[in-house]
Structures are given as structure tokens and as C-alpha cells.
Image (cartoon, grey):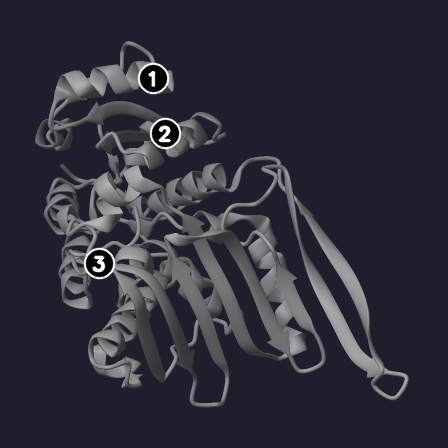
């Protein structure tokens, strides 16, 4: 099926899988102002899909079928793929071959070679491919970027962690071979993306990673990583399934630092903020004086809804003949840059934590 002209009838989405994260996205789509709707939920067990539709409040008219049956439907012009990472190559490829635009949960691929294969087929079929990083679409991010430029960012430190329970470590796909990148692919993806954002999406030159804990499947549970740029800028981050929830980032600039306590999932769906902080020693360094300016950013809709509206806009532009992703080309898109950094951090961790050249992966 051709993907041209699909927006004349809006974005008609098939959800492939009944993952927990899909519940959040189905709600987000329902809140979108664009002509976007979920019309199919697919599962290996269509009966499970029917139960799931009832749980998330989708209408009885929602079709329930297998993954392949969903891709065969002409009414569908886009798919949301929240499947385990090891299944992305198969189902993103099949979706692209069927002419469907794709929003895929991160990480899109287990490694750069696989991502390159996915990107190639999406380019060939001229379909949109976007990862599900929701914070990228919050208006706070664009405000942050414009604020940072004159401040000269030099170092980004961040932590994204949560405390998994016994059931999580025993049964969750992120702790077995279905998602072999573990905490780095699930959580570190966000640390890397916010670091790239702070440095205006320039690629770092080198990276290193340390696996502080891995499970019996060789899946990283806790990692500490860092990257540096040729001009001396740097970042460091921790990602873990073993620590109480943290989602903070501190961006050290020449004369101030910018702090966010909730950079991945805002504490409130209707507004968010960040702090610009200037500190200095006073009274012969007997104490430190801190001046804080809080920047408030309001948003009418949740960031996940804004993500889907942006996805619809990208699809429309592509269908109108642009034939390119929003970053200009897939070759060095946000998704590709993030995967490059993940690959370098993991390669370093598997090779004694030596520093590795990020660009040699590309």
C-alpha cells in the first residue's frame, strides 16, 4: 500500500502488542487534537487484545487481530510498536514494507547494524520512523535549548533510575534477553538524549561505560557512563533498575548551571520548570551564596500527546512529498545519534571499560 495521501483520512493506528507503555500512549492519542485514532490492537492472541481494549477503554469497534493481519489492513497507515527490542527488526521491517509509518518504542534496535537495516527499509519505502522519547516534545525542551545557547554548556550530569521489585526482575522483558541493552537501552537512552540536546546534537568523540551490576542473562542492571566531545565538553550519567526513582539533570555552564528534577516524566502534566542557578563563595569562602531563577513552562496537553501530534505532522509532511524526516535525513537523526552513543558505551563496558571512539561505530 502506498503511504502517500494517507492524512486525508487522518492517522489510523494499529498498536502491535499489549505492553503496559501502550496504555499511556492510547490515552495520549485520545487527547490529541489532530485526526489520530487507534483502530486496531494486535496481539499474538487476538482474544488477549480484546480484553486489553476493554481495559484501556477503546470502543468495541476496535479491531483485534494478529500482528500480520493488522499490517495487511488498508485502513491502517501507521503503527505503534511497543514490542521487545529483539522483535523490532522483524516488525518494523514488515510494517515499513507494508507502507505504514512507524512510532517505535526505544531503543529502536539492539545495535547499530540492526538500526541501519531498519533505517534503510524505511528510507526505501519512504515511511516515517520516530522513537517514543516523550520529553522531546514537551515545550520545556525548546525553552531549555534556547536558554542554554548563550550560557555555554560545558558538562551534563544526569541520573535516571527506579527501584524494580522481585516481579520486575523475574518477569519483565527489560531484565532478560528480549531487551539485551537492559538499563542502558531503557533508561540510559534518556540520559544520552538529554546530553545530546544540551550540546545541540553534535556527536561526541569518545565514550566509556561501566556495568556495575548485571543479571544471570548478562543484562545490565546498573551502569555508569560518560562521553566527551573534541572541544572539551563532556557528560556523565547513571542508569539503574536498583535505585529509588531519580530523573534529574544538571547542565553546568560557564557562569551558571541549569537544573531539572523531572526531565523524563514531569511531576505535573500541565506545567514544568527548570532552574538557572548561580552560586559563589562569599565572606572569605565561609559560605556559599546561591541565586536561583525558576523558568516555568505551561503546556495544555501531556507531552505524550504532543509526541503523537508531532508524529502526525511528520507523516503529513512526508506524504505531501517532503520525503525526509524532521532532522533532514535518517543518516544522522536523533535516533541514530542516540544508538551510536549507546553502542559505544556498551562496547566500552564489554571491553574492560576502556574509552572507545564513538565515530568508529558509524
Q: Locate residue 280, reporting x and y percent.
A: 79, 80
Q: Which residue is mark 2?
A: 23
Position of 60 with respect to 25 (left or right) is left
Please name the residue that numbered disc 3 is placed on.
219
The Cα atoms of the two marked residues, 3 and 2, are separated by: 26 Å
The quarter in which the N terminus is drawn is top left
| Residue 183 versus residue 282 in the image, above or below | above
Front in this rendered view, residue 247 or 124: 247
- Mark 1 vs mark 3, foreground winner is 3
Q: Callout 1: few (<14), some (14-19), or many (20+) C-alpha neighbours within 10 Å?
A: few
Residue placed at 55% from the left, 59% from the top?
248
Report the side of 9 relative to 17 (left or right).
Answer: right
Q: Nearer the viewer, mark 3 or mark 2?
A: 3
**Outermost right residue:** 283
Which element is circle 2 on? helix
Dots 1, 2 in contact, CB < 8 A? yes
Amino acid at each position: 500500500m502506498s503511504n502517500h495521501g494517507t492524512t486525508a483520512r487522518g492517522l489510523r493506528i494499529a498498536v502491535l502488542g499489549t505492553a503496559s507503555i501502550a496504555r499511556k500512549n492510547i490515552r495520549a492519542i485520545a487527547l490529541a487534537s489532530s485526526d489520530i485514532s487507534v483502530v486496531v490492537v494486535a496481539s499474538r492472541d487476538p482474544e488477549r487484545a480484546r480484553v486489553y481494549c476493554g481495559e484501556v477503554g477503546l470502543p468495541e469497534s476496535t479491531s483485534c487481530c494478529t500482528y500480520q493481519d493488522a499490517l495487511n489492513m488498508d485502513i491502517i497507515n501507521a503503527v505503534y510498536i511497543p514490542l521487545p527490542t529483539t522483535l523490532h527488526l522483524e516488525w518494523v521491517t514488515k510494517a515499513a514494507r507494508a507502507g505504514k509509518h512507524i512510532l517505535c518504542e526505544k531503543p529502536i534496535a539492539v545495535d547499530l547494524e540492526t538500526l541501519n537495516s531498519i533505517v534503510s527499509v524505511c528510507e526505501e519505502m519512504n515511511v516515517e520512523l520516530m522513537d517514543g522519547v516523550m520529553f522531546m516534545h514537551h515545550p520545556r525542551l525548546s525553552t531549555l535549548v534556547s536558554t542554554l545557547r548563550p550560557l555555554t554548556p560545558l558538562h551534563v550530569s544526569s541520573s535516571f533510575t527506579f527501584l524494580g521489585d522481585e516481579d520486575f526482575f523475574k518477569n519483565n522483558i527489560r531484565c532478560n534477553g528480549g531487551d539485551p541493552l537492559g538499563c542502558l537501552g531503557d533508561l540510559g537512552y534518556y540520559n544520552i538524549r538529554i546530553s545530546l540536546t544540551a550540546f545541540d546534537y553534535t556527536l561526541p568523540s569518545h565514550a566509556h561505560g561501566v556495568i556495575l551490576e548485571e543479571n544471570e542473562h548478562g543484562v545490565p542492571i546498573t551502569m555508569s557512563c560518560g562521553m566527551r566531545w573534541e572541544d572539551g565538553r563532556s557528560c556523565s550519567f547513571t542508569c539503574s533498575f536498583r535505585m529509588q526513582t531519580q530523573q534529574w539533570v544538571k547542565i553546568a555552564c560557564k557562569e551558571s548551571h541549569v537544573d531539572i528534577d523531572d526531565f523524563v516524566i514531569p511531576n505535573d502534566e500541565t506545567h514544568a520548570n527548570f532552574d538557572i542557578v548561580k552560586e559563589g563563595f562569599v565572606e572569605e569562602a565561609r559560605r556559599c551564596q546561591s541565586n536561583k531563577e525558576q523558568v516555568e513552562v505551561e503546556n495544555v496537553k501531556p507531552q505524550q500527546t504532543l509526541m503523537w501530534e508531532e508524529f502526525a505532522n511528520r507523516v503529513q509532511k512526508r506524504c505531501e512529498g517532503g520525503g525526509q524526516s524532521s532532522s533532514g535525513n535518517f543518516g544522522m537523526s536523533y535516533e541514530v545519534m542516540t544508538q551510536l552513543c549507546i553502542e559505544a558505551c556498551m562496547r566500552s563496558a564489554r571491553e574492560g571499560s576502556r574509552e572507545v571512539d564513538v565515530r568508529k561505530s558509524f
